[in-house]
Image (tube, rainbow, N blue to C red):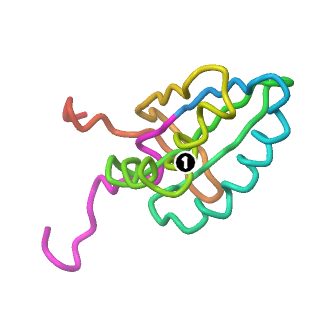
Amino acid sequence: MNPGMTDPHPKPPAAKALFVRLIARDGKDSEVERFLRDGLRAVIDEPETSTWYAVRFGPRDFAIFDTFPGDAGRQAHLSGQVGRALMARAAELFDVAPEIGHAEVLAFKLPGESGQVRDETSGD
């Protein structure tokens, strides 16, 4: 693209996502909650992590959901501080190993921006 021209299809801030369901071991729910709350400090410094949520569904049932503009940001996050710590502490904190689901974002709403994500493979 020539300098000064705008991209007719700019990269959305949320095109790729991760979803990780976490089931805490008996008696480890407080530690898992603390681990997830403390993780915020690390992901704030990740420029390619657009959104990051640590959520609790029940007494031992947690999840992480995050979005990225592309695969590079998603991979950087997985190999970042929280991703490494999650895998290092998995046997201690969780009943089963965290299953990391990779997803494609179809549409998003963020403060000041929303839209549908273009499917680059189909040319749409």
- Is residue 69 rendered to the left or right of residue 57? left
User: In the rendered view, would you say 8 is above or below 35?
Assistant: below
Point 49% across, 36% down: residue: 18
- Is residue 9 rendered to the left or right of residue 107? left
Residue at far left of view: 2
Seen from the viewer's position, the closer of residues 54 and 117 is: 54
Magenta-drawn stretch contains 7: yes
Point 18% across, 79% down: residue: 3
Point 35% across, 49% down: residue: 70
Point 72% across, 48% down: residue: 35
| Residue 1 percent coordinates (x, y) | 14, 67
Residue indicated by mark 1: 114
Q: Which residues are magenta?
A: 1-18
Residue at far front of view: 92
Q: Quadrant of residue 73?
A: bottom left
| Residue 112 percent coordinates (x, y) | 62, 59
User: In the rendered view, would you say 52 is above or below 124?
Assistant: below
Seen from the viewer's position, the closer of residues 118 and 101 is: 101
| Residue 115 percent coordinates (x, y) | 49, 44
| Residue 23 percent coordinates (x, y) | 70, 23
Q: Quadrant of residue 59?
A: top right
- Secondary structure beneath label 1: strand
